[in-house]
Each structure stands twice: as C-alpha cells, then as structure tokens.
Image: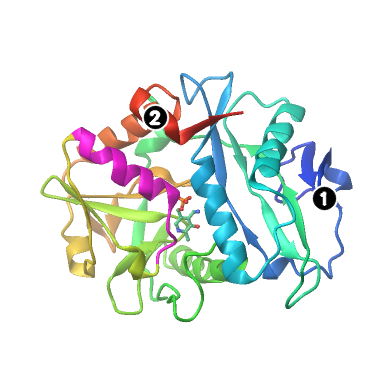
Amino acid sequence: MSAAGFGGSRYCWMNGSVMETKDALVSPMEAIHLGIFEGIKAYVEGDVNGSGDLNIFGWTQHIDRLWRSADVNGLAMPYSKDELLEAVRACIIRNDYNTNTYTQPRIWPKKAWGSDDSHVVVPVWPFETLLGKGNKKFGEERRFMVSSWRRISSDALPTQAKSWANYQNNMHAIREAKRCGYDNAIFLDNRGFVSEGTLACLMVVRDGKVITSPVTASILESVTRGCFIEFIPDLGHPVEVKDYTRVELYASDEAFLCGTGGECTPITSIDDIKMGKGYPGPITKKIGEYYAEILAGNVKKYKHWLTPV
Ligand code: PMP
C-alpha cells in the first residue's frame, strides 16, 4: 500500500504509538469519509526559511477546534489534547524534521453512524512556505474567480467543523476554477455575501482598512484569521468583520487569503478585475512579513501563539 497523503514521511502516529507509515494500514471499508481532521503547521524558530528548532503555531486554537468538530459530528475522542500534542512532537522528532512541518490529525468512527470509539492518526510532513524575506513564491500571480458554487450553508452542514464531508464543496469550486482557466475560487454564501476562499479565509483591503467576513457567512472559523484580526491593528490598519458584497470585493485595493495552508496569499485578480495598482499590494506585503516574524517567534507580543516542539 502506498503512503499517499503522508508526504512520504517515514513515521506517523496511529492509535497510540509512533509507527512506520507503511505499517499504518486500515481497511478500505473504514468510515474515513465520516471523519474530521485538523491542519496545523510548525515553523522554524528565528527564520521561517531556515532550519532548526520548531514551534507549533496556534496549537491550542487548532486542538480546541478539533474537539468542537468531534462534538458537532458526534465522534468519540479516545485521547487527550496533551496526548495528541505529544504525538505530534514524537512524529516530528522521529522523522528527524528540522524544517517547517505540517500535521493533519485525522479522526474517524470505528463503526459508521454512531460509534463510541474512533481511530486517530497523526501524519506529519514537510512543506514549503511562501512567506519570509525575499521569497519569490509570495509574489506569484494568482487569478481567482467567484465560484458559481455557493459555500455550503451552516444550516445544511456544520461549516465551522472541519469534517471531510465539507471539502467536497471546495473540490467542486477548485475544479470549476481550473476548468475556466483560473488558479482558484472565492465562495459567496447562500445569502450572496462574500464567504471565503476554497481552503482558506479571505481578507480584502479598502481605503487602508482590512475587511473580513463574519463567522455567520458560513466560513470555517479560521485560526489564522483570528490571529490576523489580533495583530493587523498593530500595523496601523483597522480590521472590520462584516458582511460585504461581490461588488465591494471587485472594488478592493488588495485581497489575500489567510489560513494554515494559504498562510498569507496575495490575489492578483478576481474575475479578471485587478486588485489595486501594484501587486502584491503594500498592505498585504506588510501583513505577510509581520506574520512570518510572528511564526518565527521574533515578535515577543505574539509568542503565546507558539508551542515549542
Ligand atoms: N476555510 C477552510 C474551508 C479551510 O479548509 C481552512 C484551512 N483550515 C481555512 C478556512 C482556514 O482555517 P485555518 O486558519 O484554521 O487554517
């Protein structure tokens, strides 16, 4: 069996112990599709493009969301939050990783439709950041479209829970964007207001102010968004959490994604309408640079967002 989805990492943690990924086998009849997950990153201390000691970003927030996802979906959590933290640490150490890593704890019921026990697997793999000084990836062109698919509404599926079921919605929007020649897509919610990106939240800049949709716009309650709302005012830009329309989106000076995967991703255009004059926008750049410093543990005020491996 291949180690698809584990990024080729030699070791993972499953149901209580670190093991070789090739031995982490489950039956294809398992109810993984009824499961939940989290996506969590650890960054190198001092320089996100360097190597050395790692700090996990937003551990408490991510693990609390995982527990909320389990509650909402009626899944048992057979391990404690501390045990999962030790699992992530053990995986990173056993794999000998000393550059940025991503971990994706996955939990699914041992029996479909109402089980009082769950499988838990914690894979870890390295990733390349688009942040950090002089990183060319940050400024790459990214053309977005507004998807014809609406973001699933929270009265149909619990959008604030990170369950695999919700990701079919993202998959449809991404496929549509690629088919239409775009890089990615933005969702409107069921009321027609801007919701979020496909795997990340969205922020726009208008007249020096940063605007982002409220949780009631069917977004995933993003850990990164929470951090951005906390630190962006330090850079002299107020943040307003409010509903906004597709036209306000088009009329923005800058737009960027924020999320664990997306980090701070500048957007070049939406439906071929260019965002502002320069690219990446100056405020997006400032935010991306400051966020990289926070992730590297270089901003004392925000050290509380980091947990050492
Ligand atoms: N929305 C969706 C649908 C996502 O998959 C993600 C990534 N987890 C986000 C938003 C951003 O959330 P976070 O900042 O917690 O990663």
Q: Main secondary structure of the magenta part?
A: helix
| The residue at label 2 has a CB less than 8 Å from ligand 1 | no
Q: Residue at x 71, y 63 (%)?
A: 76
Task: Say how many tags the image has.
Answer: 2
Q: In the image, is residue 225 part of the stretch drawn in magenta? A: yes
Q: Would you identify the image quadrant in which residue 66 lies?
A: bottom right
| The residue at label 1 has a CB less than 8 Å from ligand 1 | no
Amino acid at circle 2: Ile
- Nearest the viewer among 121 and 16 is 16
The residue to which callout 2 is attached is 294
166 vs 183, left or right, is right
* Percent of width and height locating residue 234: 22, 34
Q: Residue at x 67, y 65 (%)?
A: 35
Extent of the magenta region: 219-235
From mark 1 to mark 2, how far is it between C-alphas? Answer: 36 Å
Q: Is residue 36 visible?
A: yes
Q: Earlier in the sequence, mark 1 or mark 2?
A: 1
Foreground mark, 1 or 2, reads: 2
Query: Considering the image in quadrants, where does the C terminus appear?
Result: top right
Amino acid at circle 1: Ser
* Percent of width and height locating residue 297: 44, 24
- Nearest the viewer among 265 and 270 is 265
6 vs 27, left or right, is left
Q: Which mark is residue 2?
A: 1
Q: Residue at x 68, y 44 (%)?
A: 84
Q: In the image, is residue 82 part of the stretch drawn in magenta? A: no
Label 2 sits on a secondary structure element that is helix
Sort mark 2 into few (<14), some (14-19) or many (20+) by Cα contacts within 10 Å. Answer: many
- Nearest the viewer among 81 and 206 is 81
* Percent of width and height locating residue 126: 63, 35
* Percent of width and height locating residue 86: 70, 36
**217 to 99, vertically: above or below:** below
